[in-house]
Image (cartoon, coloured by chain):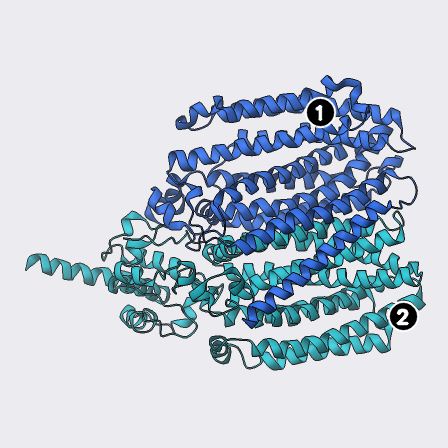
Amino acid sequence: MDASMLYALRDPMGVPAHPILFLVLGVLTWALHIAAVHIMLGASGLAIWGSFGNDAYKRRLAAAMLMTVKVAISVAIVLGVAPLLFVQVIYDPFWYTSNVLSAWWVIAFIVILILATYLLFVFYARNPKLADGAKTSCPGSMIASVLLLLVVGFIMHVLAVQMLSPDQWMQWYAPNGVIDPSGTKIHDYNIWRFGFLIALAAPVTGAWLLAYRRYLQAREDADHGYLNWVGSLAQKMAIIGGVVSLVFLGIWMATLPEAMSGFAFSPWVIGTVAVLLFTVFLPNILGRKLDQGLWGYSILAVGTVALIVVAAMREAVRWTIIYGQHGYNPLDYLVNMDWYSTLLFFLTFGVMGTLVVGYLLTVAWKAGQSASMYTPSPAVNRLGNIAIASLVIWMIHYFAFGIYTIMT
Amino acid sequence: MDMIGLYPMWYEPGIGSGWIIGVIATLHVLFSHTSVGAAILFAVLAYIGYRDNRPELIEFIKKYGLFLLVFSYVLGSITGPGIWYSTTVGSPRGISALIHTFVWKWATEWVFFVIEVIGIYMLVYLVGKVSVKTHMKIAVIFGIASYGTMVIIIGILSFMMWPGQEKWFTDGGYLNAFYGEHTFASLAVRTAFMFTMAAVVGGIVAAGLKDQVFKRWLVTRLSILGIGSVIAGSLMFMWYMNTLPESAYLVYENRVPESFIPMVLTVLALIMAYFIVTLIQPKFVTATVASIATVAILVLGLWPGETIRESIRKPWVAGQYVYGNQIIGRDVPGMNVKSEIPAIEEHGFTKTAVFWPESQREINYKNAHEVGRTLAITTCTNCHSLSETGIRPMVNYLGGIGDYERIKTYLLGALATGNTLYMPRIPLKDDEAEALALYLASLNDPGVVARYQAAKSAVAQNTVEE
C-alpha cells in the first residue's frame, strides 16, 4: 500500500489544532496509562504471591496490594481513554485498519476486561481479612484475572503492531485476492516488545512500593519492621525487573525490521536504557536518604519520567516505520483550526482539572496519613471552594455558549 | 484519480456488527445514566444528611456508591471506550468523523471522567474519615463532574444525528456543530431519565436497609423522584420530538413501526405505576423487584428507544454527511469536505476503493461473482447481512429473486440514483451493478452464477469466432 492510499484513508475533516499537540498528548497520556497498568499488574502479582503462605508481612502486603489493584484497574481504564482518543486523531488510517482486521479481538477486549475486573472483585470480596491470616479464599479467581488482563494487554499490543505494516494489510484482508471480512485473526505480534512493556511492571511496582513505604512512615502507628521489609522487596523488584526488561528491550531491538537496524543505537533507545538503569539503581544510590523528606517518593517521580521516555521511544519506533518507511507524515494533517475547543480543553485540563484533582488528591493524601478523622486546613478548604467554583463556572459557560449559539 | 478512503470491512454474519454496537452502547447508556443521576442524588442526600445530622443517609450514600462502583463504574467505564472500539470496527469512518470533529470536547470530557472516578472512590471510602464539610465538598464535586460528562457527550450524540446548526454545513465551526435546540432537548430527556434510573436502581440498595423507618422514608423519596422524573421526561420527550428535522420525520413515518408511540406510552405508564406502588407501599421494594424493574426499563424502554434514535438518522451515520456504508455523501464546504459520490460515479468502486483486491479492479464474467461479493461486503454489510441470520438479511429484501437482471435494474434505477428512502445513494457503474446483482441473485439461486458464466462465455466465444 503506497503513501497516496494511506493519505486517502485520512479523515477529510482534518484536525482542530496542530497535529503535534495530539502526538505529544498521546505520548504523555500513554505513559500515565501504562504506569497504572504496570502498578495494576505488579500489585496483582504481589497480591497472589503474598496470599500464599502464612508470612504476616507478605499477607499484609497482599491485602494492601489488593486494594491498590482495585483502584489501579479503574485508573488504568480511565487513563487509557486519552491515548485511545489521540491515536485515532493522527494515526486514524493505521489504527482503524488494524482494528478492523482483528475486529473480533477488539470486541473480545471489552468482554475479557470486564471478566478480569469481576474476577478481581471476587477475590477482593472473598478475602476481606487477608492481612489477619485468614485462609486465602478462591485464589484461582485472582490468577485468572491476571491472566485475562495479560490477554487484554496482548490484544492492544497486536493492534499497535499490526498498524505498522501497511504493506501487509491487503494480504491480511484479502489473501489470494479473496476478501476475508471475518476479523477473527491475529495477524502480527512481537513477543519481545510485549514482554518488555509487561516486564516493566516489576520496576514500576518497585518504585510504587518505595513511595507506599515512605507514605506509611509518616503515620504515627507506622510498623517500621514491615516497612523495611517492603523497602528491601521493592529494591529487589526494581533491579531484577529492570534487568529483565532491558533484556527484552534488547531482543526487541534485535528483531526490528532490517530497514530499522540502526534504531537500536539511536538516542531514543540509548536514552531509554540510561533512564531505566538510573531509575532502578537510584534507591541504592540514595541509601538512607529514602527515609528523609521527599526522597522516598523520588524513585516514583524518576520512574514516571522513565516511562515518558519509554513512551517517546515507542512513538519513535512508530514514527520511523510510518514516516520513514511508508512515507506517511502524521504532522501534515489538514488543520481546521478551532480556537474555542482547543482553548476550552487546555483551560479545563490545566485550570479546572488541576484545581479539582489537586484538591481531591490533597484530601486523600492527608486523610490516608491521619490516624483519626481528617479536618483540612483553611487553605485546603479554600482550595476546595475554588475547585467547586471552577466547576460551576464551567457549567455556566457551557449553557451560556449554547444559548448564544442558538440565538445568533 | 482520487482514491476513496474506505477501510476494510468487518462482516459479522451471526447477529451483525450493528447489533453488537447497539448492545454495548445501550448497556453503557444504562450504567452511565444511572451513575450520573445517582451522583447528583448523592450530593443532595449528603447535604440533607449533614444539615439534619442524619448519619444513615451518609451510610446509604456509601452503600449505593459501592454498589455503583462494582456495577455501574466497572461496566460503564469499560463499555464507554467499548463503544469506540465497537464503532471503530463496525463503522470506522463514522466514529472518525465524530473523533475529528470533537476530539477536544472528548478530551475535555475525559478530564471530567478522571474527576468522576477519583470522586466516587473518595466519596465511598472516606465516609467518617474526613470532616463533614470535606465529605460534602467531595459529594458536590462528584455530582457536578458526573453531570459534566453528560452535558459534553450529549452534544456529540446530537451531532451524530444532525449538526446543531444547519449553517455548520456552509460555515463550519465547532459551536455550530455542537449546539442546537436538539442538543438541549436531548439533554433534558436524558437528565430526566438519569433520575428515573437513579431512583429505580436506588431501590435495589434501599431494599437491603434494616432500619424499616428509614427505608420507608427513603423509598418514598426515591418514588417521588421517579414520578417527577417520568413526568418531566415525558414532557421533555415531546419537546425532543419537535426538534427533529424533516428528514427524520420522513424516516420515522415510513420506517418506524406504528406501535412505537403506544409502546413508549405503555413503558412510561408501567414505570409510573411502579413508582406509585412503591410510594404507597414502600415494602413492595425488594432487591429482586427493583432489579426486575431495572432490566425491564433496559429491555422495554431503553433498547427500543435507542434503536429508533439510530434509525431516524439513516441513511446517515454521522453529521448527515457520512453514509451508513461509510461513504461521504454530501459536501460540507464549511469544513472543506467534499462528497465522494462524484468520484465513485465517474470511476466506480473497483477503481477508487483503497482496500480492493488488484485482481478485482477489472470486471469480467469470470470474476463478476467475486467482485459482486466484494461490492456487497463493502457497500451493503454495514446494514444488511448476506446470510439468513444477522441484521436485516439481504435475502429478505430480494423477495426470492434469482434473476440478476431484475436486481440490476433496481440497483441502477433506484439505488444508484439515490431514490430509495432510508438507503444511501450507491452510484454503481453498469458492470458493477451487474456484478453486485449477480452476487445478490446467487444468495437465492446459487446456480445463477454458472448459467451467467456459461452465457457470457458463449457470447465471448461467438465474438471471437466472428
Q: Are marks 1 and 2 in contact (CB under 8 Å)?
A: no
- Residue A361: which quarter of the image? top right
Residue B389 numbered mark, or none: none
Disc 2 residue crowd, few under 14, some 14–19, many 20+, Cα 10 Å: many
- Residue B223: which quarter of the image? bottom right
Query: The disc labelled 2 sits on which kind of residue?
Result: Arg
For the image shown, how many numbered marks are present on the structure?
2
- Give the chain letter at badge 1: A
Q: Nearer the viewer, residue A180 or B66?
A: B66
Q: As displayed, is residue A392 above or below residue A269?
A: below
Q: As displayed, is residue A389 above or below residue A131?
A: below
Image quadrant containing the C terminus of chain B: bottom left
Identify the residue position indicated by label 1 in the image: A237
Where residue A375 appears, as percent x and y from the top left, is 89, 46
Q: Are marks 1 and 2 on the same chain?
A: no
Can the viewer see residue A185? no
Taking the image as shown, residue B360 lies to the left or right of residue A234, namely: left
Q: Colour of chain B?
A: cyan
CA–CA distance in space, label 1 to label 2: 54 Å
Q: Residue at x 65, y 76 (%)?
A: B236
Taking the image as shown, residue A274 lies to the left or right of residue A8, namely: right
Q: Which chain is tinted blue?
A: A
Where residue A78 appears, as percent x and y from the top left, is 65, 47
Say what secondary structure mark 1 lies in.
helix
Disc 1 residue crowd, few under 14, some 14–19, many 20+, Cα 10 Å: many
Q: As displayed, is residue A84 above or below residue B293?
A: above
Identify the residue position indicated by label 2 in the image: B216
Can the viewer see residue B283? yes
Q: Residue at x 41, y 51 (%)?
A: B8
Where residue B285 appears, as percent x and y from the top left, is 83, 69
Taking the image as shown, residue A233 lies to the left or right of residue B165, namely: right
Query: The disc labelled 1 sits on which kind of residue?
Result: Met
